[in-house]
Amino acid sequence: MARALTCQFATLTRTGRPVTWPLTPYVNDDRRSIDVSTGLVCPAKAERARRNPNVALLFSDAAGLTLEAPPTVLVLGRAAVRDSDLQANTDRYVKRMLNKLPAAMRQAPWFVMRAQTWYWARIWIEVTPLRIVWWQKGRLTEEPRTWNAPDGIEPKLSDPAPPGSSPGPWQSVAGDDWRGHAARAIGRIGNPTVTFVADGWPVPVPVTELRALPEGFAGQIPKVHPSVALPAESPACLSFQSHAEKFVGHDNAAFVGRVDAGFDQLQFIVERRLGGFVLPGGLLRRTSHFLGYGRKLGSRLEVECRRRSQPVPRVRRPNVT
């Protein structure tokens, strides 16, 4: 898991619906948690995790890994949100990115990075694993193995929530125009993951043999442990993501709706698509996308810092070890 470039991070909304997006995972220095981050200017993932700390991470994308046949790993855990020291969070993110994704970090010189604080200012989410389910060598048709945390384990606790509310969605998406995006997701992005809800937890699992239907998608899911088995019907999220072996950008898409299942078959009924943060194609296209996001999100930086009674953090060059 420490080598993975991305994982699928799943949270639950106020109404108990799962939402899943790809994030870069890191093992905490204390070895007690698997950590991900989200931008301070788009804190919805962190707000969901603070409100309901039952979260999940799925490691299923082998792109960029040197292992010949890596396992597929599902982690259910309790999230702790860290936003009480935004400067430390930003320093931590820059250093971790330099170590893990050096090719991506070489895309812009430091003077440009310092002008993009809206992106580098971060909220960290530290996930204490409580149950791990994995499929050896990614063999999804075989029975998975499981690990449960010992009794008495104490998950980390979140920092206090800031007062007020965040500015809300930063994208205006016509969610009912999903069919064209669905065709693109299947044909060009790939790596589909369906997230359903079981016993109060979001459960993301890979989908194979996915195909489009007039009302959504159909496919197969792997054998799972009974404790995280797919119910007959559940609110659900179907997400896609891809990146190159050398991580310099990424593509993704997500749809929300409901899933009906029978044994290992599923039918996903789409209600709408979600907006995403995409950095596709060559350097010029990625730069154009990134600058566009900055124009939309930059004004939120001071608002979110004021909510936390903290100054705007600076992007500082770390001593990488």
Image: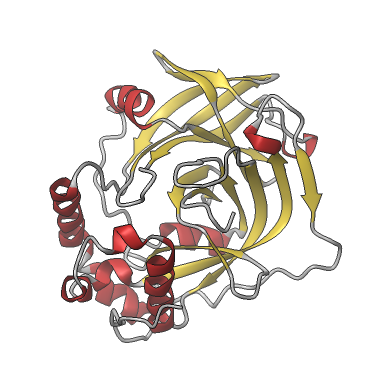
**Residue 316 location in percent, x, y?**
30, 82
Q: Nearer the viewer, residue 304 or 152?
A: 152
Residue shown at 73%/27% (left/top)? 142
Q: Residue furthest right?
A: 151
Is any part of residue 267 visible from this angle?
no
Residue shown at 60%/37% (left/top)? 69
Q: Is residue 301 above or below residue 5?
A: below
Q: Nearer the viewer, residue 88 or 1?
A: 1
Q: Is residue 135 above or below residue 312?
A: above
Residue shown at 44%/69% (left/top)? 96
On the picture, is 73 further left or further right than 281? right
Q: Nearer the viewer, residue 199 or 208?
A: 208
Q: Nearer the viewer, residue 144 or 156?
A: 144
Q: Quadrant of the N terminus?
A: bottom right
Residue shown at 69%/29% (left/top)? 231
Q: Is residue 228 above or below residue 154?
A: above
**Residue 183 location in percent, x, y?**
32, 22
On the picture, is 2 further left or further right than 253? right
On the picture, is 70 further left or further right than 188? right
Number of marks present in the image shown: 0
- Type of colouring: secondary structure
Q: Residue furthest top?
A: 214
Question: In terms of image quadrants, where is residue 302?
Answer: bottom left
Question: In terms of image quadrants, where is residue 153?
Answer: bottom right
Is any part of residue 148 visible from this angle?
yes
On the picture, is 97 further left or further right than 138? left
